[in-house]
Structures are given as C-alpha cells and as structure tokens.
Amino acid sequence: MNLSDIRRIVDAKWDDDLLPRLVEYVRLPAKSPAFDDSWAAHGHLAAAVKAGEIWARAQGIQGMTLEVIAQPGRTPCLFFDIPATHGLGDDRTVMFYGHLDKQPEMTGWREDLGPWTPRIENGRLYGRGAADDGYALYAALTVVQALDAQGMPRPRCVGLIETCEESGSPDLPAYLRQLAPRLGAVQLVVGLDSGCGNYDQMWVTTSLRGLVGGVLSVEILQEGVHSGSASGIVPSSFRIARKLLSRLDDMDTGRLLPEGLHTPIPAERIEQARAAGDILGDQIWKQFPWVGCNHGPDAHAHAMPTTTDPVEAILNRTWRPALSVTGAEHLPGIAAGGNVLRPRTSLKLSLRIPPTLDGERAAAIMREVLEKDPPYGARVSFSGGHGATGWNAPPTAPWLQQAVDAASQAAWGRPAAWMGEGGTIPFMSMLGERFPDAQFLITGVLGPQSNAHGPNEFLHIDAAKRLTAAVAAVVTAVK
C-alpha cells in the first residue's frame, strides 16, 4: 500500500475533525470511578461516551453497528463492529481497545494550563486524557475510514472503548463475557493506550507491569497528645509506618526485599531492552523533570536517577517491582501542624510488580509483610490491597514483525522499536487469557514529557497522526 495517500487522509482528518473533538473531550472532567464516587450522578463519563457515539455515527462507515452498553451499576462502554471489505470475509478480526475515563486533576500545572483547559501549543494538545487515551476511538475509526477511502481490503474491525480503565477496569470482565459471542476469533488486538520511547519511530509495547494498590494505616493512640509530654514514651505513628515500609524495600536502593515479588526476566526482553537502550541512551532518565535539571558538564547540585545505565533503567521500569507512596492522610498541613503527637498515619501505597507475577499473590505478600508482628503492638492494617496482574506479549508472529517495521519505516523513516512499559493496563491480561492465539499491537503516544496522570499532560499531535497511519498499514497485513 502507498502510505503517503493514507497519510494525507489521516492528517486532514486529524486537523479538521479529530483535534476539535479532542479539545472538547479535554474539557470534560470525566474522572474514573476510583476518583469520583458520584460519577453516575455527575454524568461526565456518560457524556464522553455520548460524544464519541454521536461522532462515530456521523462518519458514515458502511455496515458499522454501534451501541452503548451499560449494565446496571457499571460504567458504560462503547462497542462497534465493522464488516470486512473486498471479499475478505469476517474470519479475520482486528479488535481496537481504548478508554474515555481520566485520572484526577493533580497539582502543579503550568499557570496558563489546567486538566480541563485544552490548549494547543507547539504541536501539542495540553489537558487531561487526550493522549491517555481519549484519542483511541477517534484514531481507530479514522484507520477504517482511511483504508476504505483508498479501496484497501481490510479485515473485520471491532472496538471496545471502556470508562473505568484508570480504576483497574473492574467492570470490563462483565462486558467481555457479554460480548464474547459477538467478538468472534480475534487475530490482532490493537491497544492505543501505551507509551513510546521517543516520537521518532513506532514503539510496540512487549510487556506491562502489574499493580497492587492499597492503604497502610497505623494507629497507636485513641487521640492526639502533647508531643512534649508523650514523645520518648509513645512511638510516632509515622515512624512505625516508616519501619513497616522498610520491610518492603531497601531505603537506599529501592529494591523490593521480599523475593516473592521478583520474577525472572526473559532473555528476549533483556535483548529488547538493550536495543531500546541503544536508541534512547540517557534520554531514558533525562526525560523526567528533575530538580536542578541541568545534567550537562557544568551541573552542580541536582537530583539523579537510581541508575544512569539505559538498559538497567529500562529493566527497572518494566520488569522489576517498585514501591511508591502516592497519598497520605492524618497529616495536617505545615501551617496547622502543632506540637501534637498524632494518633494515626495512613499512607496510600502503589506497588508496580513484574509482568508475569500474579497480582493477587503479590497483594497477599504485601499484606502479610506489613501486618505481621506490628511494632509496639500498634493497630496496623493494609486495606484495599487488590492486585492487577501485568502482561507479557506472546511471541511475535513474523507477519506482524514485518508489518510493524514496514509501517514505521513508511511513517517515520525509521524501524520500529520494541520495549516493555512500566504502567498497567488490566485489559491486556484479560484479553491475553480470552484470546490466547491472538497477536498484540500495543502502542501509543505517551512519550517523553507527555506526563500522563501528572500536570501538563499532552498529546503529541504529529506522533498521533503518524501512528494512526502506521496502524492502518498494519491492519491490512493481518493474517
């Protein structure tokens, strides 16, 4: 196929239609249910799905069936089914996946930016959710439109766009069970919710870490007491929490201590990390907004990564477990912090686990380590510790390897790169189990500085255009 013709269609569609749609999508505070208990009453998730539905119906894609599916008490999802063209038959199916729910606001946005305030600047669309991954529905149907406009034979295409991915996709298994008879045998899963090491070539995600999240709570008193009177007798609840966390990871290196939280790294993934390290070099760690960000020869005091070796950095963020404290309660602000020994401390913990480690097993290990033998007889609990298992891609079929490399060369002029990602997409392990014979094209536009989930999140527009065209090329090669 001539990708330049597809590029012209895709670029025009992005400029004239997709960008304006995504600008409006950014304005919606469609926070995932984990961050909005009143999501149903607020209606933002439903509004995001409705906007996508209206747009999709207006595209006039021949033979497409489209519906919003909403089981009682569950977040809605959008499902489409488009028959194959040019006599290919519906025995070959490509399944597109994306989500329309978002992470919460987060602090630290640039003064003229905001999570629900779209701004296009220097080829980037700033705002929450466009790259993660509100563009997926629009890009997927643009792929179909571009191929059909060029008369290119393509297989059957189905799509599932959910609205609780950022909460761990708790509603998705029910929808997969409901839709299973209609999905049929899927040959290729295309997920557009992942990252890229740079914006200079196509990146394919080979693995995703799993996730265990929960709240560690430590109580030592029934109420706060004067610190001058009690300190030295009553242990600080914060110190007890620190002691418990030291059971999980080495405070100097960050290495997780329980051996049950580690798994062997496959040789193929190590080789792919070496190839990606050669491409990215120091960019793998310099991409982050370090304090005192001058890393040149004249740099003075500045923050540094756990390792500057590109390969080790890639393996650390894709195959090794890592613990983060992402929230806290019962800690007053500095202005309100008096001379009081607080009765309790609660910390929200986020543990990224290796792709092949069972999430529930990791959660059980974490709970046991934190709750056993509480220091000083404190009341210790680890609540909400449910695990999401990661994902490791099956061996890549030769046809997919060739199609991806050809598409990357045509769209960027450079070969594709293959690398694991540190984030979690629960949908992938679910689909991996349901379609064990399928191939997976997991990719995305969350590259350097795009800052998904954080302040100043953006969609790299040129990368999104090129990726849309490249995916179109791969779809035509499905076997």
Image: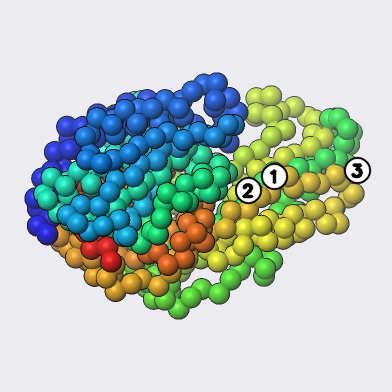
- Residue marked by disc 3: 233
- Residue marked by disc 2: 213
Describe the element under mark 3 as helix, strand or loop: loop
Coordinates of residue 264 in the picture (x, y in percent) = 55, 74
Q: Is residue 216 left or right of residue 176?
A: right
Is 109 above or below relative to 165?
above
Q: Residue furthest bottom?
A: 267
Res 305 seen here = no
Q: Residue at x 65, y 25 (%)?
A: 335
Res 49 seen here = yes
Q: Amino acid at mark 2?
A: Gly
Q: Nearer the viewer, mark 1 or mark 3?
A: 1
Q: Residue at x 17, y 63 (%)?
A: 409
Coordinates of residue 4 in the picture (x, y in percent) = 9, 53
Describe the element under mark 1 as helix, strand or loop: strand
Q: Residue furthest top?
A: 41
Describe the element under mark 2 as helix, strand or loop: strand
Cβ atoms under marks 2 and 1 closer than 8 Å:
yes
Residue 419, located in which quarter of the rendered image?
bottom left
- Residue marked by disc 1: 384
Question: Mark 1: few, some, or many residues within 10 Å (few <14, many ≥20)?
Answer: some
Coordinates of residue 99 in the picture (x, y in percent) = 42, 41
Question: Mark 2: few, some, or many residues within 10 Å (few <14, many ≥20)?
Answer: many
Coordinates of residue 130 in the picture (x, y in percent) = 35, 37
Q: Amino acid at mark 1?
A: Gly
